[in-house]
Image: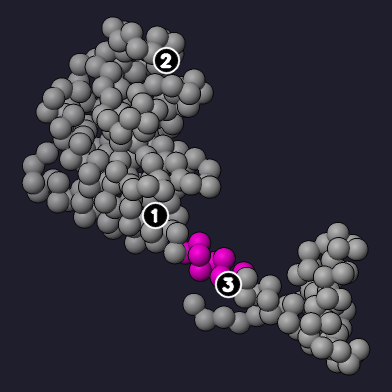
Amino acid sequence: MEAEEQNEDFQRLHQLIAGAEDIKVFLDGMTRYAAAALSRASGASTHCAVTLRRRKRAVTIAGSSDESIILDGIEQALGDGPCVHALTTNQMILVADVHNDGRWPEYAKSLEAAGAKGVLGVPLQLGEDAWAALNFFTVEPGLFTQEVTEEAAVFADMAAQALRLALRIATADLLAEDLRAAMERRTVIDLACGMIMAQNNCTQSDAFAFLLKASQHRNQKVHDIAAGIVRGRSGEAVTTFFED
């Protein structure tokens, strides 16, 4: 990969961050660029899939094409193969020719039947809370030469930098959404407490205790009880206004 092409790939990856509405969209774009980069390097069509694992989040899988998702799904179904090992060992795993590689015989047989002849699993360095690996596939054996694998490593380094940033932005967005939701719930509860205080001439603590008791008695969330009280008194749901 020439320096100019590396720079273009780097720019495209970071432009993806601004244009992607979520991590899945970013990963779809990233795998398309990854496939294009290794297709240039190998001189043959290359497919790419990515597996992203995050703490307390569902596994995210994306690909450069329908074929890449199908091929990656073989390993996901079996639970073992080069991409899984790249994730767990944090090392690049090469299967130059699936027909002659004996490490994962069932995987190799299924992959060859699906039309893939070579596989390259490349881990992405994301830190302690996320793990990801690129899975490259070719329809001809022996295309992942030393030069191609070196260029895969260069692309993976750039992709990891961009993905780390995308994950930080996504985490910040989720935290903001959680905070907004918590503020909205608190607003409804405060309004209901105010209504109970006015009606019963009691303290805020007594009003909240009333909501809590009703919540336990009806087996509903405190927020839902509060929202029902507000709707019953005002005739409409609460609308909250928070600036972004």
Task: Please give the residue where the numbered disc 3 appears in the rendered image.
Answer: 180
Q: From the top left corner, tell me how far across and down residue 122 is, in percent.
A: 28, 33
Callout 1–callout 3 Cβ contact below 8 Å: no
Q: Is residue 41 left or right of residue 226?
A: left
The reply to whether residue 25 is in sight is: no
Residue drawn 68% across the image and 73% down it: 185
Quadrant of the image occupied by residue 68: top left
Question: Residue 11's image quarter?
Answer: bottom left
Residue 242 place in picture, x, y as percent: 57, 80
The residue closer to the viewer here, 194 or 153, is: 194
Label 3: element kind: helix
Up the image or down, 50 lies above or below 239; here it is above
Q: Residues within 10 Å of mark 2 (few under 14, many from 20)?
A: many
**Could you say which is closer to the camera, residue 119 or residue 221?**
221
Residue placed under numbered mark 2 in the picture = 107
Q: How many residues crowd mark 1 within 10 Å: few (<14), some (14–19), many (20+)?
A: some
Residue for badge 1 = 167
Q: Residue at x 27, y 30 (%)?
A: 91
Q: Earlier in the sequence, mark 1 or mark 2?
A: 2
